[in-house]
Image: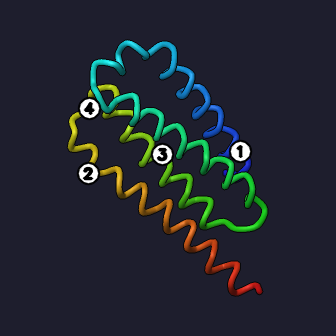
Amino acid sequence: MNRLVTAGILGAIAIALGAFGAHALKDRLALIPEASGWWQTATFYLLTHVVAIGAISARSVWPAWLWAVGSVIFAGTLYAMALGAPRWFGAITPIGGSLLIAGWVLLAWSARKES
């Protein structure tokens, strides 16, 4: 799939989930002390990496894919926990975070080779 299409779809999802959490789920998220923070962090990381995917869409394939998959895993597990999934989902979250970091490292490595 085209990276701009991926960025567009994930961006729309990030905005929708951010708004959904802030409005429709406000009372539900208040039931778990950390839930609101998890939801905000998930939305922030998802949206941040959507912008990064779009910014390098014509340039680099692998960082964009690492960010896309990492964002889905990272944000997805946080969203799930905020909605009441078992806390062991938190053990999966670092896998997504590691993919996000790997995407940034790969981008830096690629840029280093070009300069």
Helix, strand or loop status at disc 1: helix
Q: Position of residue 61 (x, y in %)?
A: 66, 65
Name the N-terminal-most of marks 4 and 2: 4
Q: CA distance from mark 2 to mark 3?
A: 15 Å
Look at mark 1 in the image and give the residue it sits on.
5
Q: Viewed as shown, does residue 44 lie left or right of 34?
A: right
Q: How is the image coloured?
A: rainbow
Residue 66 appears at what percent x and percent y?
53, 61
Query: Disc 3 designates what residue?
Result: 72
Mark 3 or mark 4: which comes first in sequence? 3
Q: Secondary structure at mark 2?
A: helix
Q: Please, what is the three-letter code of the amino acid marked with disc 4?
A: Ala
Identify the residue position indicated by label 2 in the image. Answer: 91
- The CA distance from mark 1 to mark 2 is 30 Å
* Mark 1 residue type: Val
Q: Classify 10 Å Cα crowding around label 2: few (below 14), some (14-19), many (20 and above).
A: few
Spatial separation of the CA atoms under disc 1 and disc 3: 15 Å
On the image, the x and y values in percent for residue 83 come to: 33, 26
Residue ID at (21%, 35%): 86
Task: Give amino acid for label 3.
Answer: Val
Q: Is residue 111 left or right of residue 69?
A: right
Q: Nearer the viewer, residue 74 or 23?
A: 23
**Residue occupying the point 50% across, 68% down:** 102
Label 4 belongs to which residue?
85
Q: Amino acid at mark 2?
A: Ala
Tell me which numbered mark, 1 or 3, is placed earlier along the sequence.
1
Residue 47 against residue 103 in the figure, above or below: above
Dot 4 or dot 1, earlier in sequence: 1
Are the residues at dot 3 and dot 4 in contact (C-beta closer than 8 Å)? no
Q: Nearer the viewer, mark 4 or mark 1?
A: 4
